[in-house]
Image (spheres, rainbow, N blue to C red):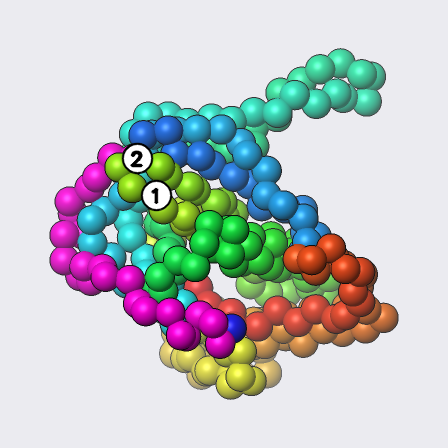
Amino acid sequence: STTKYRRPLRAVFLNQFEGRFTRYPRAKIYKAPPPGEFGAPNELLGEADIEIADGAFGHGGERNVFAMRFVTRTTFTKVTADSRGRQQRDVEFEAKPGEQWVVKEDKHARVNDSFEIETHDKSLVCQVTAGNLAQNFNAATAQLGGDIPRLKYLEAFLITTEIPSKRILFTERRLEADFQKWNTNNGIVLRAERPLGSGDGSSDEGRIRTEHVPQAFSHWTLADNENGVDYEDSDGRARRGRLLVCDIQG
């Protein structure tokens, strides 16, 4: 929004102190709203002690990225009933000490807590919705046969801290892989020479290449809801629109 760009940037150490961590006790962990429920609030899972690097190791157009880790094994469960009415515990969140996570923080100074939480909530519901669409896309492409790469989105959460400082953060597990941006919000398609199969790709003529799949997925998400989808905006007003997943990277 234009409000965002009128706000000053946060002061942050970039590519400094990445290996120095500060502990944040009793950080609150929230799960994303269900897929497609853009006006729904997040859900508190529980609290955990975490450690966040003092310096950011990267940044994007919107957020700075810091390394994060859980101090102890952290598990949150939910009691549900099976088909016979018997209670069972389902694991909703699990993290182990030593696992590498990242937290992403708005690059701009906070307007207020509700504004920043709403911004992260939109990112969370977008990611969980894209993940749900990716599962449907994988099921559709599996029927075509062949060795077509599958898509998967990382599960993301919201974290808020109070001590030693108040922070509102988007978090997910750290992805250790060669980074590639496949398309953008502005309609740009980026090509990469990463062919399906082995070798230099010379024998892949006419075959589906890895770089084709993200573009096919973007088109498929729009075609899959050609009749529109109903949703509520952040003000609780009923809306109807179409979904398109873009700005794919990973």
Q: Which residue is mark 1?
A: 166
Q: Is residue 233 above or below residue 226?
A: above
Residue 192 seen = yes
Instruction: Say whether residue 92 is left or right of residue 202.
Output: right
Q: Residue at x 51, y 69 (%)?
A: 248
**Element type where label 1 sits in the image:** loop
Q: Residue at x 18, y 59 (%)?
A: 13
Q: Is residue 73 above or below residue 7?
A: above
Q: Position of residue 161 (x, y in %)?
A: 37, 39
Q: Is the C terminus in the top left, top right, bottom left or bottom right quadrant?
A: bottom left
Q: Is residue 113 above or below residue 150?
A: above
- Mark 1 is surrounded, within 10 Å at the Cα level, by few (under 14), some (14 to 19) or many (20 or more) other residues, namely few
Q: Which residue is mark 2?
A: 163
Magenta highlight range: 2-24
- Mark 2 is surrounded, within 10 Å at the Cα level, by few (under 14), some (14 to 19) or many (20 or more) other residues, namely few
Q: Position of residue 19 (x, y in %)?
A: 16, 47
Q: Residue at x 29, y 41 (%)?
A: 165
Residue 120 seen = no
Q: Position of residue 235 (x, y in %)?
A: 69, 58
The amino acid beneath tag 2 is Ile
**Element type where label 2 sits in the image:** loop
Instruction: Say whether residue 102 is left or right of residue 153.
Output: left
Residue 20 within the magenta-colored segment of the rendering: yes
Instruction: Say whether residue 37 is left or right of residue 164.
Output: right
Decide which of 13, 142 is in the foreground and name it: 13
